[in-house]
Image (cartoon, grey):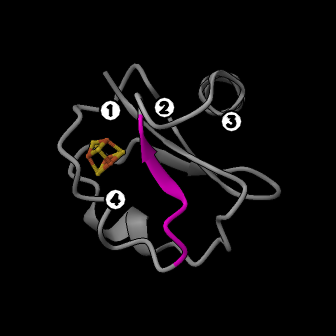
Amino acid sequence: MTYAVTSACIQCGTCFDVCPVSCIKMSSKQAVIDPVECIDCGACLPVCPTEAVKTESDASSAVLKFNATESARL
Ligand code: SF4
């Protein structure tokens, strides 16, 4: 399981401060979550001001793929 960030991200960085394993990275347009490193704690979801963070079951396959490929590239 993992969480994922959608294009609603405004790159505020709030989620960076709460992630206990530092698995959130910033791509050119938005934050992304590394699905390999994420421990599924849920800390990032309630702090996002734009509700850009989604659970794996709420995220589309395209969003999950983007988070995985971008975080692997960064
Ligand atoms: Fe980090 Fe927890 Fe959010 Fe995963 S669910 S990205 S471990 S804060």
**Of the image marks 2 and 3, the number of the one nearer the N terminus:** 2
In percent of the image, x 81 and y 58: which residue is there? 29
Inter-mark Cα distance, 2 to 3: 10 Å
Q: CA distance from mark 3 to mark 4?
A: 22 Å
**Crowdedness near tag 3: few (<14), some (14–19) or many (≥20) residues, C-alpha within 10 Å:** few
Q: Nearer the observer, disc 1 or disc 4?
A: 4
Residue type beneath disc 1:
Cys
Classify 10 Å Cα crowding around label 4: few (below 14), some (14-19), many (20 and above).
some
Is the CB of the residue bearing disc 1 within 8 angstroms of ligand 1? yes
Residue flagged by tag 2: what amino acid is it? Asp
Q: Label 4's element?
A: loop
Q: Where is mark 4, residue-wise?
A: 45
Q: Residue at x 36, y 29 (%)?
A: 2
SS category of the residue bearing label 1: loop
Q: Which residue is mark 2?
A: 34
Q: Are marks 1 and 4 in contact (CB under 8 Å)?
A: no
Q: Looking at the picture, which amino acid does disc 3 mark? A: Leu
| Mark 3 or 4, nearer chain start | 4
Instruction: Bin the neighbour count of mark 1 within 10 Å (Cα to Cα): few under 14, some 14-19, many 20 and up.
Output: some
Residue highlighted by disc 3: 74
What is the x, y in percent for residue 36? 40, 19
Q: Estimate the x, y position of residue 28 in percent, counting from the top left.
A: 82, 55
Say which element carries label 3: loop
Residues at circles 2 and 1 in contact by the CB criterion of under 8 Å: yes
